[in-house]
Each structure stands twice: as C-alpha cells, then as structure tokens.
Amino acid sequence: MKCTATARYIRMSPRKARLVIDTIQGKSVTEALATLDYTQKAAARTIRKVLKSAMANAENNHKVDQVEEMKVTQAYVDGGPMLKRFRPRAMGRASRILKRTSHITIVLSDQG
C-alpha cells in the first residue's frame, strides 16, 4: 500500500530542502522521524510535518494498522514557482532576486 503526502508552495529553496530529504530516503518511519528531530536545518521542521501527514493518510484514509513499520520509499523536492523581486543597485540599475518555492512529496510503502 502506497500512501502519499505533498506540501506545495513552501517558501524554501529546493536545493536546501533536498539536503534534508536525502537523509530520510529509504528509512523506516520511526528512523526518519528520529533523524528529522535531530537535524539542525530549517527544512527539517517542514519535512517532518509532511512525513507526519503521510503517516496520518496511511492510518485514516488507507486503514493501515502498522504505520510505524512502513518505509519512506520515495521522498523528493521539486521546484515551485518563483517570486520575482528587484533590488536597487549602483548607478540606477536594478537586479532581480528570485525567491524560490518548493513542492515536497513523501511516499510511504509497507513493501520495503
């Protein structure tokens, strides 16, 4: 049984979020939660919320009894739309600032 949770339009760079999400790939749910609890990155808090949401989806929507025995089979971060802002520069010029967003997806499965 595959259970999915997605958080979209998260105001975080996908590159920074991928550093954290790669640490939980292939681990069991309890190991992944423990890893995220002790990770010193801002992205860990958001990814932990998505993982807990995937666990709740498995328990409530798919009627899985042993949620703690499931594994993180897929975990990936895609880039979302960018907010484009401008910063004043020297001699009347302007430079573009891209405020990036992310789509975080976690898939849990009971088959390792």
Image (cartoon, helix red, strand yellow):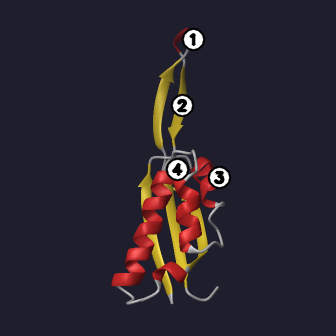
Crowding at dot 1, Cα within 10 Å, few <14 / some 14-19 / many 20+, comes out as few
Query: What distance separates the C-alpha of mark 2 from that of mark 3?
Result: 25 Å
Kindly identify which residue carries mark 3. Answer: 19
Q: Secondary structure at mark 4?
A: helix
Q: Earlier in the sequence, mark 2 or mark 1?
A: 1
Which disc number belongs to residue 90?
A: 1
Residue 93, how many percent across, how many down? Answer: 54, 17
Q: Nearer the viewer, mark 3 or mark 1?
A: 3
As drawn, 90 above or below 64:
above
Kindly identify which residue carries mark 2. Answer: 96
Q: Amino acid at mark 2?
A: Arg
Q: Earlier in the sequence, mark 2 or mark 3?
A: 3
Crowding at dot 3, Cα within 10 Å, few <14 / some 14-19 / many 20+, comes out as few
Residue placed most toward the observer, 101 or 112:
112
Q: Secondary structure at mark 1?
A: helix
- Residue positioned 53% across, 76% down in the render: 107
